[in-house]
Image (tube, rainbow, N blue to C red):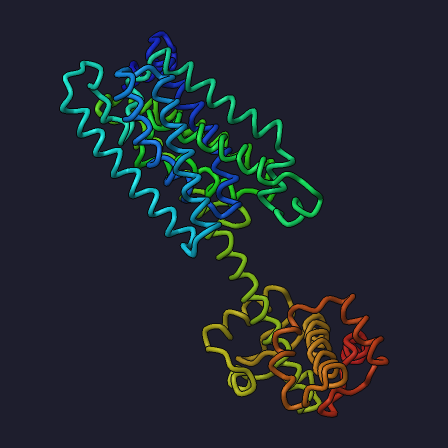
Amino acid sequence: MLEPFLEFWSLSDPNVVWVLSGAVLLGSSTGVIGSFLFFRKHSLIGDALAHAALPGVMSAFILFQSRDPLVILGGAVVSSFIGFFFIDYMNKHTKIKEDSALAIVLSLFFAIGIFELTYIQKLDIAAKSGLDKILFGQAAALVRADVIVLGIAGLLSLAIVVLFYDKLRLITLDRQFARAIGMNVLFYDLLLTFAVVLSVVIGLQIFGVVLMAAALLFPVAAGRYWSDSLPWILALCGIIGATSGAVSANISYLAPQMPTGPWMVIILSLIFLLSLCFAPHRGVISRYLKNRRRNQRINDENLLRSFYVIGERRNDFVRAIAPEQILSVRNMSGWILHESIRRMQRKRMIEHDNFHYRLTTKGLREAEKITRYHRLWELYLTRQANVAPNMVHDSAEDVEHLLTPELEQRISQELGNPQNDPHGRTIPNHQLVAGEQSR
């Protein structure tokens, strides 16, 4: 296995160079172009255009009886554009919704292409051999002439993105603003469509008609998890697409029975799953940990406020409290209560006293702060929003965990530095109470 691997990366075999170049170029260009479709919420149009290209390829072969790359490319481009205009017409001039229009064009053009392919198989033409591979792709059949045409088309589509990036970004992310400033939106729509058609058409030989949508969507679906910046997402999509192309070409070389196109889809799927799980801010694991930390903080703050409420009722913040007393004023499970108590002990906010617990000075200060937030927000709702006092508790239960010292100060000043909440309870000042407690 090691010897074929090294042989592949030595690039001594011209066929390896053609396949590797084609796969890398295709992966990078489709990844970049597919990003614009993704953000315009036209993700499936690439799939429809790929299927729409099939009758064009077959018609070009029937007319010229040649598999010259330029002939195939020309037929695919014309057919894909016809499919695009059908979709666009139905969207703008009929009551057919976009998803239905895509399904109609995809099914109709694919059926016509299959009819033509069946017809070609009955013709006595030597060049027809292998024409059916366009359905699922056949990167191993790439030759120098194919790669040259593929390279020109791929570079042209990337050049369109580079040269007209600002305009394409604007019509993708804010079409209303683009129209408002007088931009020729239709022209740039057609320019982007031309780049999409080029990417789709050059991908047919490797991905085939059936898998083309994956090449357009998987890179941006993965890249979206790593960044919010469009330039960075485009760069990531290009890298992801190129990497999948290089790896899949290598796998196909080591296992000749394995086609490159499906391997590219598998590699792209793996990259997407890794991004979905492990991306630092949007990944599933990251979000789970973030939510877990937030819920723990809320439970801890609720626990501290429960200690404060009990101490306030007894007018004694020093005497230790049994866990059962906490559960009598706070709706939480015993397991969550004990987990929260352990965390507060580690932070030295609660101390243990013969199976009972009490707030430390540090814990009392924090409990004071949360209680102050809660009661200030209750008063704010009753005074500023005319909410009845008996209706403000639940909202304050949520907002007390979101307020910051700056917001607390602004609310307190707006309310005239009040001393009591709507229920007549004292709005605590955590610095004074902590100072009194320490004395």
Query: Can you see residue 238?
Result: yes
Q: Quadrant of residue 24?
A: top left
The location of residue 428, given as percent across then percent down, is: 76, 81
Q: In front here: 269 or 209?
A: 209
The location of residue 240, given as percent across then percent down, is: 46, 32
- What residue is at 43 percent from the left and 53 percent from the top? 94
The number of discs equals 0
Which residue is situated farthest in the front direction here? Answer: 93
Q: Is residue 107 left or right of residue 376?
A: left
Q: In front here: 23 or 131?
A: 131
Query: Can you see residue 266?
Result: no
**Quarter of the image containing the N terminus?**
top left
Q: Is residue 413 left or right of residue 191?
A: right
- What residue is at 28 percent from the left and 20 percent from the top? 63
Q: In front here: 371 or 92?
A: 92
The location of residue 140, given as percent across then percent down, is: 29, 19
- What residue is at 31 percent from the left and 31 percent from the top? 54
Q: In front here: 157 or 68?
A: 68
- What residue is at 33 percent from the left and 14 percent from the top? 68
Q: Is residue 190 left or right of residue 436?
A: left
The location of residue 141, given as percent across then percent down, is: 28, 17
Q: Quadrant of residue 61?
A: top left
Q: Is residue 376 above or below residue 8?
A: below
Q: Is residue 3 above or below residue 80?
A: above
Q: Is residue 240 above or below residue 295?
A: above
Q: Is residue 339 left or right of residue 4?
A: right
**Quarter of the image containing the C terminus?**
bottom right
